[in-house]
Image (cartoon, rainbow, N blue to C red):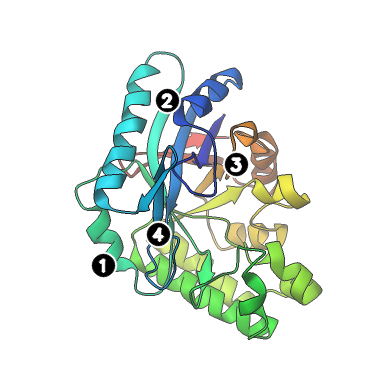
Amino acid sequence: MIDYHIHTNHSVDARGAIHEYCGRAQKLCLQEICFTNHCELDTFRNDNLIQFGNDRQPLTREGLRKMQYEVLRAKELYKGSGLTIKFGLEVGYYEGIESRLQEITEGIDFDFILGSIHCLDHICIDSSKECAQYFSRYSVKDMLFNYYRVIEQLINSQLFDSIGHLDVYKKYGLGFYGEGINTFPEQYLIKIFRMMVEKKIALEVNAAGYRQFNEFYPSSTLMKCARQQGVSMITIGSDCHKVEDLGGGIEEALEYARSFGFEAMYIFDKRKPIKIKL
């Protein structure tokens, strides 16, 4: 088993050190893990941070290098143990991030970069404290249109290897909008999935929703549409923010993917995809 979405205490909303996750991974008999700590760069917000111990500091290239060193040190320590460790990043995409992201990551070798949307109009829709500020401004139809328009930009940037928790808006959107959140505009989805196939970007099957409310990201409707449009590249991640959630829901996520006809998952090495049959 593998887990390609892991947050350590370098992310300000997570806890647990790298060595704790590695030890837990061995106990769970995971074969490969990828650390994907948050990279938030929106200068209109105050969460552009990285953490070392109890020290929170602005996210910089030097901070990313320091975090890379810690991951590579763990990789060397566990070499030959049966656990492969990869260095990744989860980037919170927003309109116009491209030059800032390229600047801050220049010269740093990543194995995997996950692109996710956490914010729209600089408001975190993935936050129980902020989401209503955004949702109250838009009808569900307009919110979905806005979201998928930014997803298009994320794909077209070609800066990412996989798209994280594609329908994350349902996390709090269901409670705000009701079942209307699931009235997917099919034309958006078809366009998105065809673009992903063309640009060779993977779709993440994210187990956080399964642990929290018994539904994966993406939903069954999206998974079915993705497969119909030819998406074949998927990554699997727990999106854990604490050690005890490492690997949580991964086996179920694999079965979920199989049920829609996906035959392989992908791991990455120096940003190169490697196919592994399910």
Going by the picture, which residue comes out furthest to the left? 107
Q: What residue type is labelled 2?
A: Thr
Position of 46 relative to 213 (above/below): below
Residue that appears at 68% across and 85% down: 139
**Mark-to-mark CA distance, 1 and 4:** 16 Å
Q: Mark 4 points at which residue?
A: 48
Name the mark nearer the viewer: 4 or 2: 4
Q: Earlier in the sequence, mark 3 or mark 4?
A: 4
Q: Which of marks 1 and 4 is in front?
A: 4
Amino acid at dot 1: Ser
In the rendered image, which residue does mark 2 sit on? 84
Q: Estimate the spatial distance between the alpha carbons at disc 3 and disc 4, rounded to whole Å.
A: 23 Å
- The part of the image, by quadrant, that contains residue 274 is top left
Structural distance between the alpha carbons of marks 1 and 3: 29 Å
The C terminus appears in which quarter of the rendering?
top right
Confirm or deny contact between disc 3 and disc 4 (CB under 8 A): no
User: Residue 90, how many percent across, how many down?
Assistant: 44, 51
Q: Which mark is first along the chain, 2 or 4?
A: 4
Graded by Cα atoms within 10 Å as few (under 14), some (14 to 19) or many (20 or more), the crowding at tag 1 reads few
Helix, strand or loop at disc 3?
loop
Q: What residue type is labelled 3?
A: Ser
Question: Toward which corner of the image does residue 52 lie, by quadrant?
Answer: top left
Q: Is residue 46 left or right of residue 176?
A: left
SS state under label 1 = helix
Residue holding disc 3: 238
Determine the CA span between mark 2 and mark 3: 17 Å
Contact? badges 2 and 1 (CB < 8 Å): no
